[in-house]
Amino acid sequence: MANTNLLIASFPRSGSHYLQHILIDSLDTRVIRRHPGFTGFDDNPIIPSITLIRNPLDTISSVISLVEKRSLSADPGYGWSIMLEPFTDEEISTKIVEAKNIYLATMNFAENKSDLIIKFETLVSDPESVIDLISNRFEIPVVSYEVDYEAFLQNNDDVETETTVNYPRYDYIKSIVENVDLSECNNRYLEVFAQSDI
């Protein structure tokens, strides 16, 4: 394996597991994933960094839905606590406030520290172009194109790759997120979106 390391920075539920998977399979590289705003995240990475961005409504709704869905299961994973009841509206609102702060930290990192900014939608719709861009930017040879997003979701049992749009309470959680003022997150997203590489 080449002596090339890449950092993927993202807000949770923005495709970092998928990008890590295809980069390990498609490029001769090592990949580290981290979330800006989380304890232990280094705002000054010494390796090339790629930030994935996704609109705040979808990604915040998805992360809260995933935490609830997994916490209601017998084996939540990732050290999450088992819950007997779904989140109350007040608990969802608290989680939205926490998520907004982490989201803004991700957008700040993308704008100020990231070497590449990639839109989630491009990653899932045209992963070959994403691989080519990363390969060219960091001069890492492509060894294969293993990029089927649907197959990745179906064949990966990692907790964080679960889709949440089919979770029965996803629409309800999203409706609460929609009624919260996300204007600061939306504005930062649009600013960073305009600077994205692909």
Image (cartoon, grey):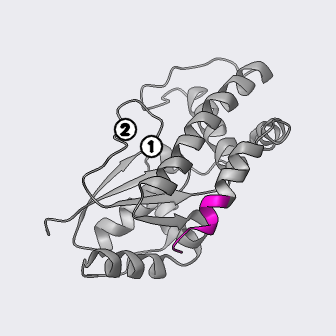
Residue pictured at 63% horizontal, 31% vertical: 68
Where is residue 49 shown, x and y percent of the image? Answer: 36, 59
Give me the disc on residue 35: 1
Residue pictured at 51% horizontal, 59% vertical: 52
Where is residue 73 shown, x and y percent of the image? Answer: 57, 29
Residue pictured at 33% horizontal, 82% vertical: 136
Q: Earlier in the sequence, mark 1 or mark 2?
A: 1
Where is residue 98 shown, x and y percent of the image? Answer: 61, 29
The image quarter containing residue 84 is top right
Task: Decide whether residue 170 is among the magenta residues.
Answer: no
Residue 190 against residue 45 in the figure, above or below: below
Residue pictured at 49% horizontal, 68% vertical: 151
- Residue bearing mark 2: 41
* Residue nearer the viewer, 127 or 182: 182
The image quarter containing residue 6 is bottom left
At label 2, the amino acid type is Phe
**Residue 97 in sight in this render:** yes
Task: Decide whether residue 196 is among the magenta residues.
Answer: yes
Q: Is residue 143 found left or right of 97 in the rendered image?
A: left
Where is residue 42 shown, x and y percent of the image? Answer: 33, 40
**Residue 156 in sight in this render:** no
Which region of the structure is painted magenta? 191-198
Residue 70 against residue 131 in the figure, above or below: above
Q: Secondary structure at mark 1?
A: loop
Residue 138 against residue 11 in the figure, above or below: below
* Residue nearer the viewer, 69 or 48: 48
Marks 1,2: beta carbons within 8 A: yes
